[in-house]
Amino acid sequence: MIKKTTLIFLTLCLVVSFASLCPAADTIKFGFNAPLTGFAAADGKSSSEGAKLAVKQINAAGGVLGKQVELVIYDDQAKPANAIPIANKLIGKDKVVVGISGSYSGPTRSSAGVFQEAGIPYISAYAIHPDITRAGNMVYRTGLLGTVQGRAGAKLVGDMMGKKNVVIITLQNDFGKSLAAGFKSVAADYGIQVIAEYQYSMKDRQFGSLVAKVKADKPDAIYASGYYFTCGPLVSQLRAGGVDAPVIGQEGYDGQKFIEIAGPAAEGVLITTTLDRDSKEKEAREFMQAFEKQAGYPADMVSASAHTAVKVAAAAIERAGSTDPEKIRQAIAKTSYKASSGLIRFNKLGEVMKPVQVQIVRDGRWHYYAVIDDPELLTPPEE
Amino acid sequence: MLFLELLIQGLIYGCMYAIIAVGLTLVYGLLRILHVAHAGLFTLGAYLGVIVTNATGSLGLAIPVSAMCVGLVGMAIYRLCYQPILSKPPYVALIASIGLFIAMEEIFRLIFGPYGLTYTQVPLQSPLSLLGMSLRMVDIFIVFGSVAMLGLLSWLAQKTRIGIAWRATVDDPQMAGSFGISVQNVRYLNFFIGSALAAVAGIFISLLSNLAEPTMGGVPSYKALAIIVLGGLGNVTGTLIAAVILGVVEAYGTIYVGNLLDRDAIAFAFLILVLMLKPQGLFSRK
């Protein structure tokens, strides 16, 4: 009897060890950090689903350099302190050939430094802080910089919509502050006068007193930064409080959940983002279809950005013809790749150069409103 | 005009804080435990409120169902988590409570998903004009609902046999026990009522923001602690007054000093100021 159990146990051990060994021998590993738990878990889910979809598509098409791609995902809870051990684990234990951040600015800044030091390429999918790419030449970004989006927002408000008296409502974090800074840096060029500026914290969901004040300010437009879970309540409370001025947001609103939370108040809200829902491009359309089928909800900016980052990495390795980090880096730098979130090219610093999509809520879905592609306005910094 | 609108907003915030903090202060008064997981029950209340409302279309049904269920969960928490460690020093229960709260947040995320739940049709959103102010039905509902519940609680505590037993146990558990009051039952009742109130507070918040999310208990978890300290730990009347004062301070503070201090910082700056002047809290018991 004892012999039999031992035998079963040994067999199981063998099976398990083979199962874990076999694919490892013949795959190329991509590291991926995302906030799968904690307050940013929703974005973590979208980004990891987008990345998984990209890997599935790459593997279905034959993989990279004839090998299958394996995505190694760790949960950083959007906390910088968690990101560093994760980056070390991805590099040291998992031996990934490239790292991708599907997370926020804080953790992405932390792990960018680790990847840079180890000499492994790292791509930030949608984190917006300017310092991320300044970690060094190994770090690239496929998402738009906060300041670039802020400048595009100012053009949208002052030039395209012709609204001059603007109230700014800023989320107090890296994201909100760099958007406000970008917006204000060019506001005067478009004749915009900022009549009042307010800040709120990530945890705020109740904006009653803010709404009362904004109503008294009588603005022509409101430039409000934040995420769907802060701005959904904000927009619905603004409308309920009798404020009719148009609300202009950014990619943090991007997603169906914003419309669900704000309800009818979401109609007419404009955002600057990277995913065009009415895109005529094959890559974007196919991505949106495949994503909704896989994830069970419509694609958003975060998922498209993560999908793009993984595809860019895979394409670079294919072109490099090797998994040597320096060769991969050189290939990434020369990227000119049509992805789900547009044509991706990088400047000297590793910042993406691509147009800003303006989307509007109509009949409960995001739709095309305009594209902003003035090179002068959108050029990211080179150092 | 703006002054009055901000005052109304402050009252709304204050009412919500009051019904969250009252449960916490009841537990502290009775057991000397800082019950951080109370905020988890607040979140659970909001989720149940959204789910029942969406399933039945009736908020009137959702509120009692959610309050009842969360009340029972509160009793279970006392029985399974606190009762076995009552003889240990107070920080043991505090750590258990914090752990429980973190676990609850993640359980909500696993069960209900990371995105949070929304009402398919948010109840009580019809606009209401009062003295030239634009309000929603829900604003009035929250103020009157909170006052009604707290009135009921006060009646229960002052006028009924149960209430007398309850107050006696808070004053002196040993003496109350020797007079034949079941201390155990009083504790269960205490957890039931406190948790049920937290559930209703959760539903109120979800009506204002149309969102029940796993981490929504984060703010109440520490702000309610600040309120009960401000109100003189374990003092119910003090807690209620402190909640309303804090609500009003926040409503004005977010507008006039919001660019210097964020909302929580305003609340805690106020707390520090009060404790410097009156270290025993605004309304301490002797």
Image (cartoon, coloured by chain):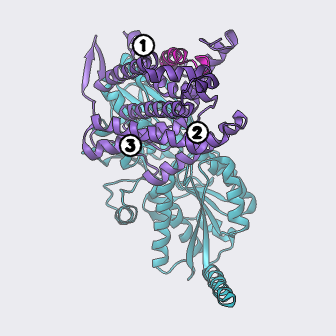
Chain colours: A cyan, B purple
Determine whether, in the image, residue A286 is placed left or right of residue B42.
left
Q: Quadrant location of the N terminus of chain A?
A: bottom right
Q: Which residues are magenta?
A: B230-253
**Is disc 2 in contact with disc 1, using a CB cutoff of under 8 Å?**
no
Q: Label 2, label 3: how many angstroms apart (C-alpha)?
A: 34 Å
Subunit bearing disc 2: A
Disc ID at residue B83: none
**Which quadrant holds residue B177?**
top right
Q: Nearer the viewer, residue B77 or A329?
A: B77
Subunit bearing disc 1: B
- Say whether residue A196 is visible: no
Question: What residue did someone put label 1 on?
Answer: B7
Q: Position of residue A301 (x, y in %)?
A: 44, 52
**Is disc 3 in contact with disc 1, using a CB cutoff of under 8 Å?**
no
Q: Nearer the viewer, residue A29 or A3?
A: A3
Question: What residue did someone put label 2 on?
Answer: A174
Subunit bearing disc 3: B
Task: Specify which label sits upstream in the sequence, 3 or 1.
Answer: 1
Q: Position of residue B228 (x, y in %)?
A: 58, 22
Q: Nearer the viewer, residue A96 or B72?
A: B72
> Total of numbered circles in the picture?
3
Going by the numbered disc 2, the residue's amino acid type is Asp
Q: SS class of the residue under badge 1?
A: helix
Figure check: B70 above or below A123: above
Q: SS class of the residue under badge 3?
A: helix
Q: Label 2, label 1: how many angstroms apart (C-alpha)?
A: 32 Å
- Say whether residue B137 is visible: yes
| Residue B90 drawn in magenta | no
- Residues packed near mark 1 inside 10 Å, few (<14), some (14 to 19) or many (20 plus): some
Going by the numbered disc 3, the residue's amino acid type is Leu
Question: What residue did someone put label 3 on?
Answer: B48
